[in-house]
Image (tube, helix red, strand yellow):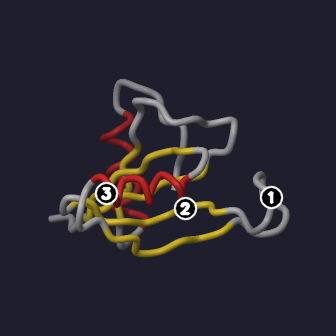
Amino acid sequence: MLSVVLGQSLSFNFVACAARTLSKIFKGTKVKKIVKYGKNMPIPAGQVMTVAFKMLGQEFLALNGGPIFKFNEAISFIINCKTQKEVDTYWKKLTQGGQGVQFG
């Protein structure tokens, strides 16, 4: 039996602003962690890369996609696995009949 924690990932251009706005709309939303871009990354160093937050009982990770990956109706799932075997199992099942675009 695989043990999985599932969360959602949203892509915004201005993730810190988006998280603040969501926390005003949905009371009780808590920002848990902010990670900034470093040197030699696609977005200038010091800008927010991700904001992890909890809203309405669900965990979310907002990703600063910059001007390239704007907010849209797409969603990504974050599946925290303990082993590479778990990652491979989910990857195989989730890409069956389709095409994967990221691999972790």
Residue receiving disc 3 = 7
Image quadrant in which you'd find residue 13: top right
Find the residue positioned furthest to the top. Answer: 97
Q: Are marks 3 and 2 in contact (CB under 8 Å)?
A: no
Q: Secondary structure at mark 1?
A: loop
Residue at the image position 35 percent from the left and 24 percent from the top: 97
Q: Nearer the viewer, residue 104 or 18?
A: 18
Q: Amino acid at mark 2?
A: Thr
As drawn, is 11 to the left or to the right of 5? right
Q: Amino acid at mark 3?
A: Gly
Q: Which mark is residue 50?
A: 2
Neighbor class of circle 3 (other Cα within 10 Å; few <14, some 14-19, many 20+) is: some
* Chain-order first, disc 3 or disc 2: 3
Q: Which mark is residue 44?
A: 1
* Image height of 88 relative to 71, above or below: below
Residue 91 is situated, as x and y percent measured from the top left of the image, at 39, 46
Q: Amino acid at mark 1?
A: Pro
